[in-house]
Image: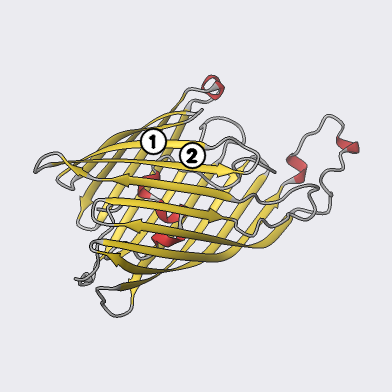
C-alpha cells in the first residue's frame, strides 16, 4: 500500500489543521469545521472523505506563548477499503521575534481500517494469497508532528504524518507510509477592499512523485473569497468561500480533472462548513495569516 494513503483536499488553505498539528491554536476563537469530499462522482467505488474537527487556544493570555488543543474525526472510503481515524492534538506557540511566532505540534490517535474482502476481485481468486482471508478489520495507533512559523502576513509549515510508519499486519508487504508536507503562503492587501492570498502545498509520500498544490484567492472585505487552484498531474479547481452570518462560513471547491479520469468521471465536489465561537481574543497573540 504505497502512494497517497491519507485524504487530500483541494481547499487546503481552509484545512491546514488536517495537515499539520502545529496549526492547533492559531485562531483566536474556537475553530470548528465539518467537511466532505466526493471524488469522481458517479464512478463505482470512488473515494469519499469526511471530517469533523475543532481546535482552540487555552490557558492565560500571554504576549510570549500560546497553548492550543484540538481533535479530529475522519472517515475515508475507496472501493472495498474504509478508514476511520480519531486523534487529539496539542501545540505550543512561542514568540521568537517581533511579530513572529513558532509553534510545534503533536497529534496522537487511532486508525481503523476495514476491508470488504468479498468485494476484491482477482484474476485467480482462489490462488490469491496477498491478503489473509480472516483479516477484515485492522486497528493501529498513529502520530503526526509539525512545525509552523507565522506572523500577520506570512506562514511556513512542515509536518510528518503517520510518523511511526506502522506495518499493516495481515496484508503482506504493507504499511502506512509517512506523509511529508510543506506549506507556505502570504497575504497582500491590494486596496482597502481587496486582499490577495496565494499559497502552495507540497506533499510527498514514499515511493511516489511529490504532489504540488497552488492556490490564489481574492478576498473582498472578509465577506467572501474566490479563487483558483491547481494540482500537479490532476487538474484545476474553482474555489469559493462565503461568510454567511457572523462566525459562520461556507466553502466549496469543484475540481476540473485533466488526467485520464476525466473520461470516466470528471466531477469532484468539496464542501466545508466552518464555525468560530469567539471569546475575548488574546490581545497579545499574533493572528496567523493563513486564517486572516
Residue drawn at the location 75% of the way across and 38% of the way down:
120
- Which quadrant would residue 230 be assigned to in this image? top left
Pick the residue in front: 15 or 206: 206
Q: How many marks?
A: 2
Q: Which tag is nearer the camera, tag 2 or tag 1?
A: 1
Name the spot of residue 290 as percent of width and height, x first: 31, 51
**Circle 1 is placed at which residue position?**
214
Residue drawn at the location 49% of the way across and 39% of the way down:
38
Is 2 left or right of 273, judged from the image as shown?
Answer: right
Residue farthest along the left direction in this orientation:
192
Pick the residue in front: 76 or 58: 58
**Circle 2 is placed at which residue position?**
38
Residue drawn at the location 33% of the way across and 79% of the way down:
59
- Which quadrant would residue 22 be assigned to in this image? bottom left
Q: Is residue 291 above or below residue 228?
A: below
Residue drawn at the location 33% of the way across and 70% of the way down:
57
Is 253 left or right of 7, judged from the image as shown?
Answer: left
Work out how far the residue at label 2 is from the one at label 1, CA to CA, in angstroms: 20 Å
Amino acid at each position: 500500500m504505497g502512494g497517497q494513503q491519507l485524504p487530500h483536499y483541494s481547499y487546503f488553505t481552509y484545512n491546514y489543521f488536517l495537515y499539520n498539528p502545529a496549526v492547533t491554536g492559531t485562531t483566536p476563537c474556537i475553530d470548528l469545521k465539518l467537511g466532505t469530499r466526493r471524488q469522481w462522482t458517479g464512478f463505482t467505488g470512488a473515494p469519499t472523505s469526511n471530517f469533523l474537527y475543532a481546535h482552540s487556544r487555552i490557558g492565560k493570555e500571554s504576549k510570549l506563548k500560546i497553548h492550543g488543543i484540538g481533535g479530529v474525526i475522519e472517515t475515508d472510503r475507496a472501493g472495498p477499503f474504509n478508514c476511520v481515524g480519531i486523534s487529539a492534538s496539542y501545540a505550543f506557540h512561542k514568540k521568537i521575534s517581533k511579530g513572529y511566532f513558532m509553534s510545534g505540534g503533536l497529534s496522537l490517535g487511532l486508525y481503523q481500517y476495514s476491508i470488504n474482502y468479498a468485494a476484491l476481485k482477482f484474476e485467480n481468486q482462489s490462488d490469491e494469497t496477498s491478503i489473509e482471508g480472516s483479516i477484515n478489520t485492522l486497528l493501529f495507533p498513529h502520530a503526526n508532528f509539525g512545525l509552523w512559523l507565522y506572523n500577520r502576513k506570512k506562514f511556513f509549515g512542515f509536518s510528518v504524518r503517520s510518523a511511526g510508519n506502522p506495518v499493516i499486519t495481515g496484508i503482506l508487504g504493507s504499511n502506512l507510509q509517512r506523509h511529508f508536507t510543506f506549506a507556505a503562503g502570504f497575504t497582500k492587501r491590494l486596496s482597502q477592499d481587496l486582499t490577495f492570498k496565494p499559497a502552495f502545498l507540497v506533499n510527498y509520500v514514499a515511493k511516489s512523485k511529490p504532489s504540488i498544490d497552488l492556490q490564489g484567492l481574492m478576498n473582498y472585505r472578509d465577506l467572501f473569497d474566490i479563487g483558483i487552484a491547481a494540482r500537479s498531474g490532476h487538474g484545476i479547481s474553482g474555489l469559493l468561500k462565503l461568510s454567511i452570518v457572523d462566525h459562520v462560513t461556507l466553502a466549496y471547491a469543484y475540481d476540473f480533472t485533466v488526467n485520464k479520469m476525466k473520461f470516466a468521471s470528471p466531477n469532484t465536489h468539496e464542501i466545508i462548513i466552518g464555525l468560530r465561537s469567539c471569546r475575548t481574543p488574546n490581545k497579545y497573540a499574533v493572528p496567523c495569516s493563513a486564517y486572516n
